[in-house]
Amino acid sequence: MTNFTLHTEETAPVKSTTILQGAKKAYGFVPNLMAALAESPAALEAYVTLSGIFDKSDFTPAERQIVLMTNNRLNGCTYCMAAHSTISKMQKIPADVIETLRNGTSFTDPKLEALRVFSTQVNQNRGVLSDADIDAFIAAGYSQANVLEVILGTGLKVLSNYSNHVVNTPVDDAFQSDKWSADIPVAA
């Protein structure tokens, strides 16, 4: 088994240190995902950059978390589910929205449910969508730009979720109260 290093500012490759310093300043600690990604300065920069770009999407903070947490759940990422549950609470996302996402159940709000369903379709169908899938999403009040932004958020989660699976990233103490367990088997 390959053991990946959770880097600190002192052990990380030079090109990762500035990003780790920024994370420590922003969060008060370096999240383990970023500490692991620091092994590859390009991967760490991609993660931080994509996160920042996704935050500029037309989605509200709650809608962004719907895209991200739907992907986290479908990809069985225990690290990201815990982290985004905590982040959602910090963003004052309603508790029922967080629990719906953690449990993979349906929203009563038809627009939020359309976003959850569309995010699921993008993930499970690897972006191969029917016209009906796209039309239903747009009919719920979203735009063509939002279609592409769901794909952007899904791409961000492929990077972080898959990295966490490979690295076996431990959940940070800051996210422990929101630990989550996936019932998704790991492929052989």
Image: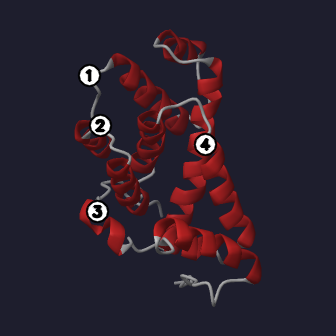
Disc 1 and disc 2 in contact, CB within 8 angstroms = no
CA gap between label 3 and label 1 equals 25 Å
Q: Position of residue 40 (x, y in %)?
A: 70, 73
Q: Is residue 17 left or right of residue 181?
A: right
CA gap between label 4 and label 2 equals 20 Å
Please state which amino acid type lies under the numbered disc 3.
Answer: Lys
Element class at badge 2 = helix
Is residue 148 visible in this depiction of the protein? Answer: yes
Instruction: Identify the disc placed on residue 97.
Output: 2
CA gap between label 2 and label 3 equals 17 Å
Instruction: Identify the disc placed on residue 179.
Output: 3
Q: Earlier in the sequence, mark 3 or mark 4?
A: 4
- Residue 103, quarter of the rendered image: top left
Mark 1: few/some/many CA within 10 Å (<14, 14-19, 20+): few
Residue nearer the viewer, 24 or 35? 24
Element class at badge 4 = helix
Q: Position of residue 95 (x, y in %)?
A: 24, 42
Q: Earlier in the sequence, mark 4 or mark 2?
A: 4
CA gap between label 1 and label 4 equals 25 Å
Residue shown at the point (68%, 78%) measured from the top left: 17
Residue shown at the point (41%, 63%) measured from the top left: 79
Q: Is residue 98 left or right of residue 45?
A: left
Seen as rendered, the residue at the extreme bottom is 10
Please state which amino acid type lies under the numbered disc 4.
Answer: Phe
The residue identified by callout 4 is 54
| Position above or below: 65 against 59 | below
